[in-house]
Amino acid sequence: MPEFDDPRLTLPDGGERTLMQVTAGIVALRKDPEPDAEMASQALHGQHVVLHHEEGEFGLVQSVQDRYVGWALMEALSAPALAPTHRVRALRLYVYPRPSIKSAPRYLISLGGLMVSEEEREGRFLKCARAGWVYEDQLSPVDIYESDPAAVAERYLHTPYLWGGRESLGIDCSGLIQQAFAACNITLPRDSDMQGAWAGDPIEDWQRPGALQRNDLVFWKGHVGIMLDDKTLLHGNGFHMAVAAEPLAGSIERIASQYGEPVGARRVKLSASIGLVPDWLKT
């Protein structure tokens, strides 16, 4: 069962507890309220966070999606939090100040970002609150999901590796897994150790030939990848410094020399999510 007393998932007692929304393209969640502090995760445009308190230009927040806690720049957040109507289904899209591809883009939003439609359309453009105009073909209604996490993960192929990243311009191993399953309406925790403890069910005798299948997860201590078939692993990793697909056997041999053997494999049912969001955080 999830252990929600983990400090990565727990706000201090007290505080403001104000529900806010990310209105930048993306915002880093840092370990300390400093611009150059380690990035622990990211929150995407449109996602909701709970503000505990402010310190300088930063606020201590908790992601509503996965409970993750970190320090976010306050300038990237807005209140009140609005209910999203659409989800970004393209790997990334531009937000424009006007309904024209010739206008200078304001910023990028990556796959999984959430939009709030103002129901104003011009041609193939849709106007979204607190953002601007986006190409509607790159969105899907917020309640429409995909069905194959591995296919979503494959869209990130060659994306640069970025510690703490959850976006199409930079992503880490567990961020890739979380984003792939989120696109299929399956909420997984942020970090690989949590995913290895809570996601799905262990696969017995997983190293037996043919035991693994598409969408299975293989774990090392501090690392995770997703299977594209029974022999091919896709993972964001520091060896390639990118999301790469390679034979699982080769990955195991290479990683073992530095970090040890895999610690197990798990299979996530595509019909159930882990209950990460407490009632008081739900909107």
Image (cartoon, helix red, strand yellow):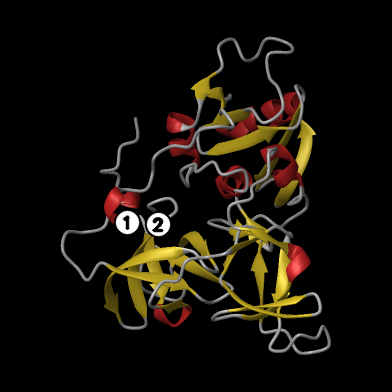
Residue at 63% of width from left, 45% of height from top? 180
Residue at numbered disc 2: 64
**Image position of 206 (left or right of 282):** right
The N terminus: image quadrant? top left
Where on the picture, by quarter, is residue 148? Answer: top right
Where on the picture, by quarter, is residue 208? Answer: top right
User: Is residue 5 shown above or below 116?
Assistant: above
User: Is residue 234 shown above or below 104?
Assistant: above
Give the mark, 1 or 2, whose residue is nearer the N terminus.
2
Measured as percent of width and height from the top left, residue 276 is found at: 38, 44
Residue at numbered disc 1: 281
Residue at 60% of width from left, 34% of height from top? 258
Q: Nearer the viewer, residue 255 or 1?
A: 1
Residue at 77% of width from left, 26% of height from top? 229
- Disc 1 vs disc 2: Cβ atoms closer than 8 Å? yes
User: Is residue 251 shown above or below 203?
Assistant: below
How many neighbours does mark 2 have within 10 angstroms: few (below 14), some (14-19), or many (20 or more)? Answer: many
Where on the picture, by quarter, is residue 153? Answer: top right
Name the element at disc 1.
helix
**Image position of 125 (left or right of 38):** right
Residue at 47% of width from left, 44% of height from top? 191
* Disc 1/disc 2 C-alpha distance (Å): 6 Å
